[in-house]
Amino acid sequence: MTSPQSEPASLPEESPGWITSRPTRMGEALQRLVRLPALIVEHRDLIITSVKRDLEIRFSGTLLGWFWPLVHPLFLFVVYYFIFTKLLNFKIPNLPPGSEAALGVYMFCGIIAFSAISDALTRGTNVIVDSGNLIKKLAFPSELLPLNVALVSMVTMIFALLVFILACLFTPIWQAPGVELLWIPALLLVQTLFIYGLALFLSTLQVFLRDTLQFVGIFLTVWMFVTPLFWVPEMMGESIEPYLPLIHVNPVYHLVQAWRGVLMGELVVMDGATAYEVISTQAIAARLGVFSLWAVGAYLIGYVLFVFSQRRFADEV
Amino acid sequence: MKNKLRFAVEAEGLGKAYRIYASPGRRMLEGLSLGRLKGHKEFWALRDANFRLTPGSSIGLCGANGAGKSTLLKLLAGTTAPTCGRYRIDGRVASLLELGAGFHMEFTGRANIVMNAVMMGFSRREVLSKMDQIIDFAELGPYIDEPVRTYSSGMGLRLGFAVAVSVDPDVLIIDEVFAVGDMYFQKKCIDKIYEFKKRNKTILFCSHSLYDVRQLCDDAIWLDHGKTMAQGDSVFVTNEYSAFQRHHIGDQGEVLADQFPEKVTQEERARRPDLPSIVDARIYRAGTDEEVYQITSGESIEIRIWWKNPTPEETPIQIGTAFMRQDMTTCGGMGTHLDEFYVRGKQGCLVLHVPEIRLLSGQFLVPILLLDEEGVHRYQEFLMPDNLTVRVNTREVGLFRLDHSWEVADYDVPRTVAVQDEGEGA
């Protein structure tokens, strides 16, 4: 050890390698935003190991194991299907022959997509606070924690999709969809980006304001009902017309419609002379486009906020 | 300028303040006003730390609880950001701020090894290639494939330490993590740290045990309430620190408890400022007033111990000492209770004569123990101003010189005792 007084600050302020007290600058935040793929590659072992670990924690040792990610949406589906079709007597009229199950499948597709988002956001909001001990004791890039949540959600979504497609192939409930299935990777990727962006944003808020998780819970419940999961906006009659533009603001509306297009194919019903396009395969690209804008926006805002706040996490959790 | 830096670790004016908010509302107010309304109080855990470490050196941090030791290590480990000042580290860093941080109880030891190492930034392949070595060091044997929740706390400690040291860092940062292990484990950790030193690795280490700091570190920093009180040679710094503590025994009721925290707690001291204490202790050349800490084997010394005991009736005392080699081997222990010598009165100077020291070369720590009447409870453990260094002029080996002589004789070779019964029975 030598005394530093002998050589007073001979190094220039910005010499490389120094870790200083200077807050993160916008330029650095953007640089890190761009460098995220490189970070993912660099830490791929950590990412893979922790995604595996998370899945194992959730499902190993349980009786239903890997079927659990399906149980929750299935349960929701059964309850709402019963309420809407049997109690409220809601149905899609004049369904083409062979697609009598359309409403059920319509609901189910919406629910698996929405559940993926809702589960991931609940977990994601708390992920930094929950991993407080890790953040305090180990130095690693903490943006990988929300990423982990998003990736776990992606894996469970893939599993739900597999089950859906197998059910289509081996049961007469619904005709297996065709080439539209090729959209799946793109949809999954954008959905994961959207979840990641929101998880970054919410987990940062949760660090500084512990009420966030409560807000998120309420918000998700509202979100579930304003998103057309159990109802078809075009068929709700005149009362909904003033709200239709608002429905189109909802990014998840575009997402579930895209999923429905991919998983169910075209669905047009005739009500007298009017044709209602319940699901359109033509519109998949447009829906995905709108949703992608939301996803990229969520990611940009979430990541920048996260990076600016990151250096204070260890002190606050 | 991509060439190797001259220093492994450099810190300049490093400081850390934690923000304390009275309520979440205050925090929100500050956030919404973009920091214009200050809603927090600052608590400075560390101020203006300056040091440079060359590769291969080791530095120990000492100081009372809350002195800022862990904060400094956390800053350097990169888990928290500095509030002022700057630092840089050359090379890979492994930090052990807490053994087993990030272990998941439901997973096997093996799975946790991988997880822990990749969190520290090492590749999966690297870990897998060192798996056997890690399991070996942790001495977990077949338990490695059992869930970590079934482990004893000692096994968990061994596993955590094994992972951290296996990844072969250039700079190793260790908070006081192995103080909780048993003697065997501590010895193993210390041996490993020595090995790191030999391989020119840089070590930052924090401990309440001044003995460990002296033993493991070339240099030391003494922190108090975040401020650097002394830094430099570890023997010098630990002496300054114990001198400071000594002076504060009387007026503050604060004690040396830090050196051996399990023996006398701060609270106990605060409650009872009249507890007996050792005021000072030094080693002199026998019969002279010359203080010596370097002797040649065979010389005679005396240890003078100044003590006080305000309430001798309530707390009768015994005084003991020992010569302890650096690897914690006790080479000789002496105590008034063992010799049925009684320390009476309220204060005094006790002299221990040790004629013709037979220890062979080495460095010996000579702690003075202030014990209760039975010699069981330790009131205080006092460190000498310096370790005792013994040199030899001969080529003898070992720990001690034993009395011995050689002779030529003509005894018969003894007949081997038959063990036939056992042999045939088998």
Image (cartoon, coloured by chain):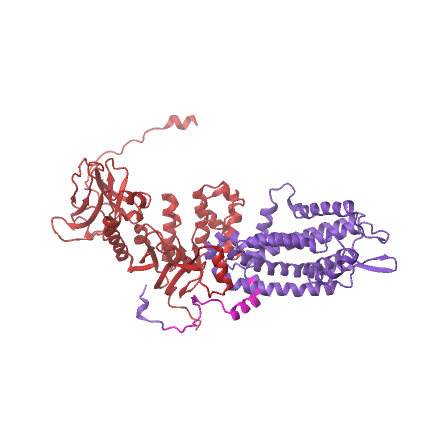
Chain colours: A purple, B red
Task: Give residue B9's position: percent from left, percent from top.
Answer: 38, 63
Closest to the observer, A315 or B165: A315
* Observer able to see residue A168: no
Q: Residue at x 29, y 31 (%)?
A: B415
Which quadrant would the N terminus of chain B be assigned to in this image? bottom left
B282 relative to A259 in the view: left or right: left
Q: What residue is at 78 percent from the left and 51 percent from the top?
A: A103
- Residue B416 visible to the viewer: yes
Front residue of A289/B355: it is A289
Instruction: Look at the picture and state if B44 lies above or below B277.
Output: below
Q: Is residue A26 magenta?
A: yes
Q: How many marks?
A: 0
Residue at 60 percent across and 63 percent down: it is A299
Front-most of residues B384 and B197: B384
At which x and y percent is residue B403? 19, 42
Answer with the quarter of the image where residue B88 lies.
bottom left
Q: Residue furthest left?
A: B287
* Foreground pick, B75 / B18: B18
Q: Quadrant of the C terminus of chain B?
A: top left
Whole-percent x, y for residue B153 in the image = 44, 43
Q: Which residues are magenta?
A: A10-39
Q: Is residue B320 magenta?
A: no
Image location of residue B278, percent across then percent down: 22, 46
In this image, A136 relative to B250: left or right? Answer: right
Task: Report whether B161 appears left or right of B359.
Answer: right
B382 over A207 or under it: above or below: above
